[in-house]
């Protein structure tokens, strides 16, 4: 196989990964790294560099579609980005100090956890507890459009959400993924922000978080132009087409299928990690 | 509360941010594509080699090195420049948010946003991690 065929195959794989990632809301990064390492035999450090770049492209590219809907909350997003960017730096620093075997195993566990998260139904939480006083002072509460008119919401448990966001940032920096699933978990489950607001704000945050670790990876020589080029262009095309189709589509079955794929990839990453193939 | 007439409301800020992001990604993707085509024309028939990690050469690791590469039309350097533009897009977005919050006289969020901005710049300059 020469560079041309190699590049074309990776591009095609990245289009599919980006497409499924945006349809299911799990992001393309979770599939890109197993694809590059397990299928194409690339070193996981090159894979992480390429994936990070594609994560920034997806997040920034999709923002246009989300902003029109008016769900994202820039105050919450910016405040929590302090946690995710510092976490991303910590994760990127850690990545250079632990073995690639351990990175592969942690990656596998995160994949399995993401598969579990995606298998659960979206729940609507009750909003009767008093909101977080710090969040009130920071004027984070807002409203979002519904068919019945604007719906106001408040933020709960800001310190706990902030901590989970630091973890999300660390995983992003360590593994080169967007870790959107953990970000949504922090906002939706911990801070009890409405699901739609959580997912769109998370998307906004993913690009900034990934940029924080991408700089470190660039300086460390993990970002290879020849490999990152087809990944970035492919994932961007795939995810933009996915966002177009997503509006009103039934994605329950797709989420289950993608969840199973991620589960298998997760087990595969752990197995290959433990048998010393990374 | 007195507001300067220049300040954008949150919705306008959202819209400007989305314009920044969209254009940043579009320009970055275009540069990467051009660099990619040049790269494939030159190296397309050579065997790929990503099995063993060596790390990129010094010129592809730093902002200044990448810019020098582009100015001398090195193919991999052109791709890397596109990727650098992509990484810079969220940074520009955050810098704009500093300005937007400053115009809204929102001191708390100016500080919050400046902290995020500082982390991003530190990462890009390569502050010895």
Image (cartoon, rainbow, N blue to C red):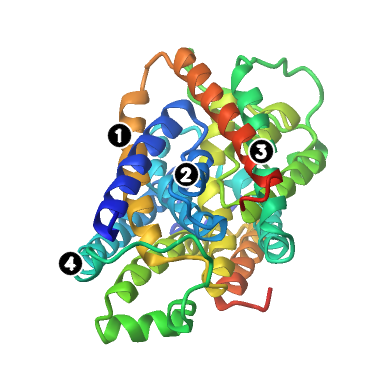
Please tell me which residue lies in front, A253 or B6: A253
Judging by the rendered image, the residue that carries numbered circle 4 is B41
Note whether A272 is above or below A117 in the view shown.
below
Mark 3 and mark 1 lie on one chain; the one further toward the N terminus is 1
**Figure quadrant of residue A189:** top right
Q: Chain of mark 2?
A: A
**Which residue: 41% across, 68% down?**
B84
Q: Nearer the viewer, mark 1 or mark 4?
A: 4
Few, some or many residues within 10 Å of mark 4 (<14, 14–19, 20+): few
The mark found on residue A37 in the picture is: none
**Which residue: 65% across, 25% down?**
A117
**Which residue: 27% across, 49% down?**
A8
> Mark 2 to mark 1: distance in Å?
17 Å
Q: Position of residue A92 (x, y in %)?
A: 66, 62
Q: Nearer the viewer, mark 3 or mark 2?
A: 3
Instruction: State left or right for residue B9 relative to residue A119.
Output: left
Judging by the rendered image, the residue that carries numbered circle 2 is A32
Few, some or many residues within 10 Å of mark 2 (<14, 14–19, 20+): many
Few, some or many residues within 10 Å of mark 1 (<14, 14–19, 20+): some
The mark found on residue A241 in the picture is: 1
Q: Position of residue A235 (x, y in %)?
A: 37, 44
The mark found on residue A271 in the picture is: 3
Callout 1 secondary element = helix
């Amino acid at each position: 196989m020469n560079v041309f065929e190699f590049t074309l195959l990776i591009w095609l794989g990245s289009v599919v990964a980006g497409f499924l990632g945006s349809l299911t809301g799990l992001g393309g990064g979770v599939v890109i790294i197993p694809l590059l390492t397990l299928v194409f035999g690339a070193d996981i450090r090159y894979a992480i560099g390429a994936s990070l770049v594609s994560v920034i492209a997806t997040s920034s590219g999709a923002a246009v579609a989300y902003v029109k809907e008016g769900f994202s909350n820039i105050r919450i997003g910016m405040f929590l980005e302090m946690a995710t960017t510092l976490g991303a730096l910590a994760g990127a620093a850690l990545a250079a100090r632990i073995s690639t075997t351990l990175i592969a195993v942690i990656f596998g566990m995160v994949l399995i956890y993401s598969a579990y998260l995606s298998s659960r139904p979206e729940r609507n939480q009750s909003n009767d507890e008093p909101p977080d006083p710090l969040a009130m002072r920071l004027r984070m509460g807002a409203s979002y459009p519904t068919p019945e008119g604007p719906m106001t919401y408040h933020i709960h448990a800001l310190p706990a959400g902030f901590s989970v966001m630091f973890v999300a940032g660390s995983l992003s920096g360590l593994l080169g993924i967007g870790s959107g699933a953990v970000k949504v978990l922090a906002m939706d489950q911990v801070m009890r922000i409405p699901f739609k607001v959580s997912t769109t704000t998370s998307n906004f945050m993913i690009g900034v978080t990934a940029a924080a670790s991408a700089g470190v990876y660039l300086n460390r020589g993990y970002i290879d132009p020849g490999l990152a080029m087809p990944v970035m262009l492919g994932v961007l095309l795939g995810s933009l087409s996915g966002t177009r189709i997503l509006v009103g589509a039934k994605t329950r079955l797709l989420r289950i299928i993608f969840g199973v794929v991620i589960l298998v990839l997760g087990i595969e990453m752990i197995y290959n990690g433990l048998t010393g193939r990374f | 509360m007195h507001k300067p007439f220049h300040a954008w409301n949150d919705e306008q800020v959202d819209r400007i941010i989305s314009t920044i992001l969209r254009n940043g990604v579009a320009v970055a993707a275009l540069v990467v594509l051009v660099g990619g085509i040049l790269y494939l024309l030159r190296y397309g028939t050579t065997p790929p080699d990503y099995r063993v990690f060596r790390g990129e050469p010094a010129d592809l690791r730093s902002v200044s090195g990448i810019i020098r590469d582009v100015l001398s039309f090195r193919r991999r350097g052109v791709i890397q420049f596109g990727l650098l533009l992509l990484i810079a897009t969220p940074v520009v977005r955050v810098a704009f948010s500093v300005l937007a919050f400053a115009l809204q006289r929102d001191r708390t969020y100016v500080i919050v946003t400046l902290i995020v901005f500082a982390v991003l710049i530190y990462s890009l300059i390569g502050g010895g991690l």
